[in-house]
Image (cartoon, coloured by chain):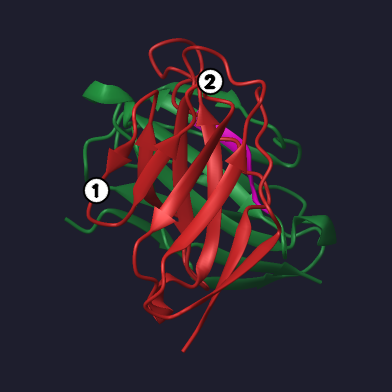
Amino acid sequence: DAKTTQPNSMESNEEEPVHLPCNHSTISGTDYIHWYRQLPSQGPEYVIHGLTSNVNNRMASLAIAEDRKSSTLILHRATLRDAAVYYCILRANAGGTSYGKLTFGQGTILTVHP
Amino acid sequence: NAGVTQTPKFRILKIGQSMTLQCTQDMNHNYMYWYRQDPGMGLKLIYYSVGAGITDKGEVPNGYNVSRSTTEDFPLRLELAAPSQTSVYFCASSSHQRAGGRYEQYFGPGTRLTVT
């Protein structure tokens, strides 16, 4: 499975934008880039995903490099509730034999200061 | 919808005891997964299922067994518990029919298991 590399931790102030980077230099052409986050004492939750184009949803934006070897999750205005571990995951096409399986790394611990 | 529910929330086992962690989803998802998460680490896949009657091993299956007799339920069985199985266990489910590559996994709240 292709792997991702993320910083161990990042800090932000409340109301400021946060850019969480992820490197995935061995990504294959059919791998989707998924982001999940895990709030303290909870299970992970889906944030956003993309294949080639930048994506926006109500939670965040995902900027994908043209060569797809890196991506950045953007939280436009961090709140205290955004403090969590953020996981960048490459998911193979679920239509094949991967069955949508996710391989979690250690993620980035985001601390948000009031 | 309740989503993915897990019971129990907490459990303490003695070495050598057995137990079953329960997982139920009400979203009619075909895919279900069991993960474990050790302190400070990411989740590791134990077993997964692509439908009733079909299960397969993940990354760390030793010491565990699963069954999938219905779409809704995916119990995880621990036989002869060992201290190395002290962890938080998460169950998740996913639809196999989702356009655009989303296939998001929905996670339960977890079961915190201690083996002493």
> Which amino acid type is shown beneath numbered disc 1?
Asn
Q: Is residue B71 left or right of residue A98?
A: left
Report which quarter residue B40 is drawn in. Answer: bottom right
What is the three-letter code of the residue carrying label 2? Asp
Report the predominant secondary structure element of the magenta stretch: strand
Neighbor class of circle 2 (other Cα within 10 Å; few <14, some 14-19, many 20+) is few
At x 76% / y 37%, what residue is drawn?
Answer: B62
Colour assignment, chain B: green
Between disc 1 and disc 2, the foreground one is 2
- Which residue bears the numbered disc 1? A57
Determine whether B43 is above or below A17 in the image: above
Res B105 seen here: no
Residue linked to disc 2: A67
Q: Quadrant of residue B14?
A: bottom right
Residue B113 location (% of width, % of height): 65, 66
Instruction: Please give the chain letter of the residue carrying mark 2.
Output: A
Judged left or right of residue A111, residue B116 is right
Distance, label 1 to label 2, CA atoms, is 22 Å
Q: Which chain is red in the picture?
A: A
